[in-house]
Image: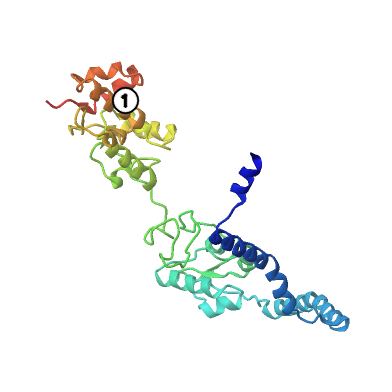
Amino acid sequence: MWKTFAREYLRFSRKERLGIGMLVLAMLLTNYLPDLFFYFQRRPVAGSDDLKAAVLAFESQPAMNKAAHASHEKEAAPAFFYFDPNTLPPDRWQELGVSERTARTIGKYLAKGGHFRVAADLEKVYGLPPALCAQLIPYVRIKDNRGFTSGRGFPHDSGFTGHRGFTGDQSGYYRGNTPDASFTRYRKKEPPVAIDINVSDSTVWQSLPGIGPGFARRIIAFRERLGGFYAVEQVAECYGLPDSVFQKIQPFLQIGSSSLKKLDLNGSDEKSLAAHPYIRYKLARLIVQYRSSHAGFKEVSDLRSLPLVDEIIYRKIEHYIEIKY
C-alpha cells in the first residue's frame, strides 16, 4: 500500500521535472555565483612597505592638524581696542572677533534706531558668544548726548525688553518680540476687561493674563467643537490650560446672549455625534444602536438609560442635544 502511495507521490510530469531542474540550477547559481564573481575580481594586496607608509602618514595627520589649527587660531586672534558700539561699522566689529552675520545684524539694529546705552547691553546681542562678550565689555566706551563717555560700571538702564536681542534671520531682526516692541522700554500690559467667551476672537483672549496665542487657539477650537459655552467653568476644561491661569482669568469671563449649537439626537450620524467632546465614539455608537432598536429617542431624558451616561455626563450633554420632530 505504502509503495503505491510513494510511487504516486514521487511521480512527476515532464514539466514538473523541468521546473525542479531549473529551481536546483537557480539555487546553485545564487549560492556559488558571488564567490566566482569575487574570485575573478580580486585585487592585488599592497606590499608591506606601502602599508607601513600609509600608517605613518595617517598617524602624522593629528599632529599636523593640531599645529595648523593652533597657527590659525593665532592668526585669527582679534586685536581688541576701545570702541563705541553705536558708531562702530560692521567691518570693525569683525576685527574684534564678531562674526560677519552678527556684525551685519547689529548694523541693521542701529539703522532702525536702536541704541546701546551701557556696555552690559552687549550681553543681549543674540549670536555673540558669552566668552567674547566678556572680553569686549571692558573696551566699550559709549558717548551720551552730552558727550560723556560711559563704560562698564555705569548705571544700567538699557531699555531692553528682557529677551535676547536681534537674530538677523529671515523672519526679522528680533526673536520673542515684534520689531516695534524690541529694544524699547517695557510697557505695562493694559488691565484686562471682561470678555464674552462665546464671541471673543484670539486677540481678545490674549488680552487676559496668562493667555498667549497658543492657549487662545485651543480655547476657541474647544468652543467650536462644543458648539459654544453654557458656563464659564467650561473654559477650565480646555486641554493644557493650567488651573492657576484659569483662576486668574475667571473674574473677566462672562457669557452673552449667544445660543448654543445643538445636535439632533435622532438625525445626527455617528461621526457627527462622536466629534462632540462630551460624547465621543463609544457613547455615539450606543446612541445610534439605541435609536435603531427603539425607533429613535422620544425625549432627551431617554439618554439616562444608556450604560455610559451617568448624572454628570447627562448634565453636560443635555445642553447640546435636541430632538427635532
Residue 197: in sight, yes or no?
no
Image coordinates of residue 313 in percent, x first then y, are 33, 22
Q: Which amino acid does label 1 sit on?
A: Leu
The relative height of residue 286 versus residue 126 in the rendered view (above or below) is above
Crowding near pointer 1: few (<14 within 10 Å), some, many (20+)?
some
Image coordinates of residue 128 in percent, x first then y, are 57, 66
Q: Which residue is drawn at 86% across and 80% down?
A: 52
Toward which corner of the image does residue 91 lie, by quadrant? bottom right
Work out which quarter of the rendered image holds the C terminus and state it.
Answer: top left
Q: Is mark 1 on a helix, strand or loop?
A: helix
Looking at the image, which is closer to me, 49 or 230?
A: 49
Residue identifier under label 1: 286
Toward which corner of the image does residue 78 lie, by quadrant? bottom right
Count of numbered circles on the image = 1
Q: Residue at x 86, y 82 (%)?
A: 47
The relative height of residue 306 versus residue 35 in the rendered view (above or below) is above
Looking at the image, which is closer to me, 290 or 151?
A: 290
Work out which quarter of the rendered image holds the N terminus and state it.
Answer: top right
Toward which corner of the image does residue 228 lie, by quadrant? top left
Q: Which residue is drawn at 48% across and 70% down?
A: 105
Residue 78: in sight, yes or no?
yes
Residue reaching furthest left? 325
Image coordinates of residue 194 in percent, x first then y, are 27, 36
Image coordinates of residue 263 in percent, x first then y, are 21, 31
Residue 296 falls left or right of residue 307 = left
Scheme of image coloration: rainbow
